[in-house]
């Protein structure tokens, strides 16, 4: 455990929040997962002041105390790639190949989007994520001023980027930059921003090179779909003689910090390119969607691990995934890696928890601020109730968390020391009101009779 407050006289005085009696997931100096029982977490000014024993804080004054006996405290989960407002399209485009999914349903519907649709979708998505123990998400979509407003209102943490295509002209790229600069550090520091070119197949080399220069000039990361599936990689090789990852290399994108969405089309020749990237490179994996689209490959987590690339967990948008459940993504990642590698020892439950916590935080550029419960880290914490029959008995706590617990077992969600959900009650979002208004807007949103698309999918 970390040192107690008594050993830090300057840290004395009343705390803002004390969570007591729980089992806390911690990381040791080698970043291995461990659990401290009958522990307490002391929070002040949005930061974890200490992780100590429950006995040490029995008489410590605090503005608020949470009795978490029988619960496990985890770092808040991070959804490393999603399109939060797309919850409004959940279940609209089912059982379709990728090309038809985009061209026949999603991109025609998205041509109808108004700011209020985006705002309502983001509110519903944030409610879902808070209830599932997600405290931070990386979003890549349109009308992102609305999403930033929702993040500010509901109390979550987010990495946000305004998506654009080359078909929008220079204005798309300029809007992405203006958004990133305007909202960087927003919501009392809970918002970070990125440039968000859609993908190498919708953004041409000239725009990618210009984006790379802007990212370098302004110190911004890049969040982009790349090598989403093997078909995209094969098509890029056939048409251009290079993989999507190699396109990012030659255009300078990989000279900056970059978050690559999906990467299930990453091939052997891409690995040295990624390893040699000048910037911090990470990949977000959203395995449920790959299964749903029947893609033949998944994110090569083990190969990326071997070259030092962090892989964060993600859900993608609910239009393809039907869910923003990062808990499910954690379990699926572990299971699919066992299947694809033919090795039941990879990923272990502890490795899966590492991906869900520290690696996901690093993937979105917040590895020094969140991802672990430790002195000096932001107080992004979730409390998980393991008293249900589906989680008992507990022989291996890590395995119980990954393979038996569910997102619905999250009782309390805390961001920056602020309680956003207590005992399953959302405190910052009125879900019935959001659902009612969104329902009124859906007929106009899903109308495809106009024949328009915001873009064409042709990889």
Image: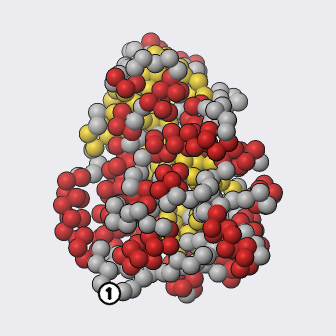
- In the rendered image of this protein, does residue 83 appear above or below residue 446? above
Q: Secondary structure at mark 1?
A: loop
Name the residue beneath numbered marker 1: 450
Closer-to-camera residue (289/367)? 289
Front residue of 71/328: it is 328
Q: Residue at 54% of width from left, 85% of height from top?
A: 167
The C terminus - image quarter: bottom right
Query: Can you give x and y, in whole percent of width and height, for residue 273 in the image?
Result: 79, 61
Q: Quadrant of the N terminus?
A: top right
Q: Is residue 96 shown left or right of residue 2?
A: left
Q: As displayed, is residue 304 above or below residue 267?
A: above
Q: Is 265 placed left or right of 150 in the picture?
A: right
The colour mode here is secondary structure
Question: Residue at image x 57%, y 86%?
Answer: 170
- The residue located at (18%, 61%) in the rendering is 436
Quadrant of the image occupied by residue 344: top right
The percent position of residue 368, horizontal first and vertical second, equals 62, 44
**How far across and down, in percent of the image, does residue 102 sit?**
46, 73
State the residue at coordinates (53%, 51%).
287
Above or below, 429 relative to 381:
below
Residue 13 in sight in this render: no
Where residue 408 appears, x then y in whole percent? 34, 37
């Amino acid at each position: 455990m970390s040192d107690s407050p008594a050993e830090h006289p300057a840290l004395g005085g009343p705390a803002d929040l004390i969570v007591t009696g729980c089992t806390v997931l911690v990381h040791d100096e080698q970043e291995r997962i461990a659990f401290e029982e009958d522990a307490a977490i002391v929070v002040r000014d949005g930061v974890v002041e200490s992780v100590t024993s429950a006995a040490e804080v029995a008489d410590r004054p605090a503005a608020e105390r949470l009795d978490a006996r029988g619960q496990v405290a985890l770092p808040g989960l991070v959804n490393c790639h999603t399109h939060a407002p797309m919850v409004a399209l959940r279940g609209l485009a089912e059982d379709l190949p990728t090309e038809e999914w985009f061209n026949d349903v999603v991109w025609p519907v998205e041509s109808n989007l108004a700011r209020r649709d985006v705002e309502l979708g983001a509110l519903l998505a944030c409610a879902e994520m808070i209830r599932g123990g997600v405290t931070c998400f990386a979003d890549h979509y349109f009308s992102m001023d609305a999403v930033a407003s929702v993040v500010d209102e509901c109390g979550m943490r987010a990495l946000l980027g305004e998506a654009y295509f080359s078909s929008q002209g220079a204005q798309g790229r300029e809007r992405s930059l203006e958004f990133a600069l305007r909202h960087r550090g927003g919501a009392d520091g809970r918002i970070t921003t990125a440039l968000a070119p859609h993908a190498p197949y919708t953004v041409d080399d000239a725009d990618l090179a210009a984006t790379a220069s802007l990212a370098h000039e302004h110190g911004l990361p890049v969040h982009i779909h790349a090598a989403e599936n093997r078909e995209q990689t094969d098509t890029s090789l056939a048409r251009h003689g290079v993989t999507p990852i190699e396109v990012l290399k030659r255009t300078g994108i990989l000279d900056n910090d970059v978050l690559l969405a999906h990467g299930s089309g990453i091939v052997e020749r891409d690995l040295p390119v990624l390893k040699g990237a000048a910037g911090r490179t990470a990949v977000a994996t959203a395995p449920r969607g790959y299964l749903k689209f029947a893609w033949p490959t998944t994110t090569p987590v083990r190969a990326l691990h071997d070259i030092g690339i962090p892989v964060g967990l993600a859900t993608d948008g609910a239009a393809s995934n039907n869910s923003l459940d990062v808990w499910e993504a954690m379990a699926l990642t572990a299971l699919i890696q066992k299947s694809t590698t033919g090795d039941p020892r990879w990923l272990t439950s502890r490795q899966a928890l590492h991906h869900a916590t520290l690696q996901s935080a690093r993937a979105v550029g917040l590895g020094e601020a969140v991802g672990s419960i430790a002195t000096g880290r932001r107080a992004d914490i979730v409390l998980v109730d393991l008293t249900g029959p589906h989680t008992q008995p507990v022989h291996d706590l890590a395995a119980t968390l990954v393979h038996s617990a569910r997102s619905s077992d999250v009782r309390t969600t805390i961001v920056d020391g602020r309680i956003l959900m207590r005992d399953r009650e959302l405190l910052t979002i009125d879900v019935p009101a959001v659902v009612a208004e969104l329902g009124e807007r859906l007929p106009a949103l899903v109308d495809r009779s106009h024949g328009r698309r915001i873009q064409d999918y042709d990889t």
